[in-house]
Amino acid sequence: MTTALRRAAHWHRPMMVFVAAMAVLAVVAAIGIVADPRVLTGVPIWLKPFKFAVSFVLYGTTLAWMLSLLPRRSRTAERAGTVIVAMSLAEMAVIVGQVLRGTTSHYNETTPLNAALWQVMGASIMVLFVAHLVIGIVVLRQPMANRVARYAVGWGLGLSLLGMLAAIPMVVPGQELAADGIGGAHSVGVPDGGPGLPLVGWSTTGGDLRIGHFVGLHALQALPILAILLSRFLGAWLDERSQVRLLVVAGGAYGVLTMLLTWQALRGQPLLRPDAPTLAAAAALVAATATAAALVLVRRRRPELALAA
């Protein structure tokens, strides 16, 4: 464990320092949730910094690990990673600063200062998106020796970009239920801050755009984890080509799921109360994914046969 931590500390130093800072902030925010009685938009005021800090710990650690897998050093990717650190710090500074001021950070345009801080966040997210895209391009241009890992990293980076794009409808003003001075919302058909699922807070009475956003972002972890599981538990039974094909099937299904959840939310529909079209689309996705995976398994070649060929 100690050796692994030492190795991780040298992946991308700015990123790993940022991860350590976010881990500390997560602990501070968790204490704030318990110790600070203030409530904002229906939840403890420190819940947002806590969720964002945990999310950045996962994001930063995974991204630094992916950069360590490149067969040769890329200054472009490393600089893009440093840009991501800077933009993430700017976003977290606004989030924590607004909590200390007792007000919201997202969509808040109630005063010139709040509007300026919200614009800083928006600009930071746009730059982060571009830097993330740059890293994805570098990864695609540097083939890894392990094809399964390469596809997992590529799909993870690409689908997390899709998750970022799923947040765009949140910042489009025009929801009738939005309060004055609020330039966007994550709920659809109901006001933000209403009844929601535990911890995540996703609306249980209307649509919630954070669901597709969350699922898409965490493809960054889900696809590499799937690749590790395939290699560890099915590596003796599935050749590399079959593992890659299963990853492609899983990646395609994951992307469609992200869009399906966003489509459900845009229609003002709670996650746990899907209507007939949503259920039909979900059933079609499950059937198509199962069929494609079954075809891959039927056509598989055992590793020893693949080596002999």
Image (cartoon, rainbow, N blue to C red):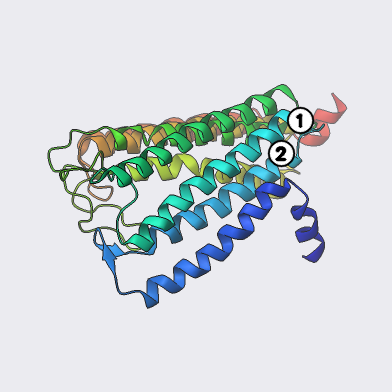
Element assignment for label 2: helix
**Viewer-closest of 171 and 162:** 171
Question: Which-is-in-front pick, marks 1 and 2?
Answer: 1
Q: Amino acid at mark 2?
A: Leu
Residue farthest left in this picture: 176
Q: Looking at the figure, which quarter contains the C terminus?
A: top right
Q: Looking at the figure, which quarter contains the N terminus?
A: bottom right
Question: Is any part of residue 287 visible from this angle?
Answer: no
Are dots 1 and 2 in contact, CB under 8 Å? yes
Q: Measuring 57% from the left and 47% from the top, which residue is drawn there?
A: 59
Q: Is residue 80 left or right of residue 31?
A: right
- Is residue 34 shown above or below 265? below
User: Picture quarter containing residue 103?
Assistant: bottom left
* Residue denoted by label 1: 74
- Is residue 43 shown above or below 58? below
Q: Is residue 234 left or right of residue 54?
A: right
User: Picture quarter containing residue 269?
Assistant: top left
Question: Is any part of residue 188 visible from this angle?
Answer: yes
* Residue denoted by label 2: 67
- Is residue 76 shown above or below 59? above
